[in-house]
Image (cartoon, rainbow, N blue to C red):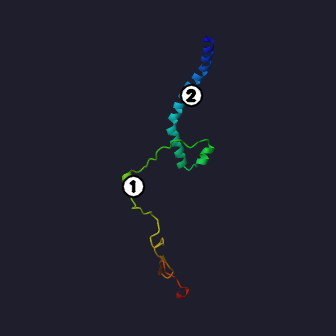
């Protein structure tokens, strides 16, 4: 029975060594998660696509860093729900379109070729 137990212990010794090394490497790998995520996001911000990064061997990070705004929240402008550059309610982005003779054509105005 002792011989059997000694063989079992001898067979488990390499496994115990590998498990210890593996545990240390997993800790080191976990420490790289944050800088890896930041570097990946920085590469995307610089114009790299996820497909291009994958070709380099960079997998999308499991945890992306939280976006940090460079401006404080108090300095952001409130638009009241309006999007800048949107067309006014009249439908024309310019409000009125000047004609060659100085008149203004607005929405609903029809131009008659005979009036020129």
Q: Distance between the residues labelled 2 and 1?
A: 48 Å
**Label 2 neighbourhood size at 10 Å, few (<14), some (14-19), many (20+)?**
few
Q: Residue at x 38, y 52 (%)?
A: 73
Label of residue 22 in the image: 2
Q: Which residue is drawn at 58% across and 42% down?
A: 59
Quadrant where the N terminus is found in the figure: top right
**Are the two marked residues, 2 and 1, in contact with CB atoms closer than 8 angstroms?**
no
Q: Residue at x 39, y 55 (%)?
A: 76
* Horizontal side of residue 4 vs 110, given as left or right: right
Q: Name the residue tied to disc 1.
A: 76
Residue at the far left in the pictured view = 74
Label of residue 39 in the image: none
* Horizontal side of residue 104 vs 5, given as left or right: left
Q: Residue at x 57, y 22 (%)?
A: 16
Q: Position of residue 15 (x, y in %)?
A: 60, 23
Q: Which of marks 2 and 1 is in front?
A: 2
Q: What element carries label 2?
A: helix
Q: Where is residue 7 in the image (x, y as percent from the top left)?
A: 63, 15
Of residues 108 and 111, which is closer to you in this image?
108
Q: Where is residue 100 in the image (x, y as percent from the top left)?
A: 51, 80
């Amino acid at each position: 029975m002792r011989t059997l137990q000694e063989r079992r212990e001898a067979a488990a010794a390499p496994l115990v060594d590998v498990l210890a090394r593996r545990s240390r490497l997993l800790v080191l790998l976990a420490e790289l998660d944050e800088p890896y995520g930041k570097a990946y996001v920085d590469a995307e911000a610089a114009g790299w696509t996820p497909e291009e990064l994958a070709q380099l061997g960079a997998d999308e990070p499991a945890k992306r860093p939280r976006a940090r705004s460079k401006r404080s929240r108090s300095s952001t402008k409130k638009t009241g729900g309006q999007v800048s550059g949107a067309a006014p309610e009249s439908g024309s982005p310019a409000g009125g379109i000047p004609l060659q003779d100085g008149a203004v054509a607005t929405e609903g105005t029809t131009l008659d070729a005979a009036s020129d």
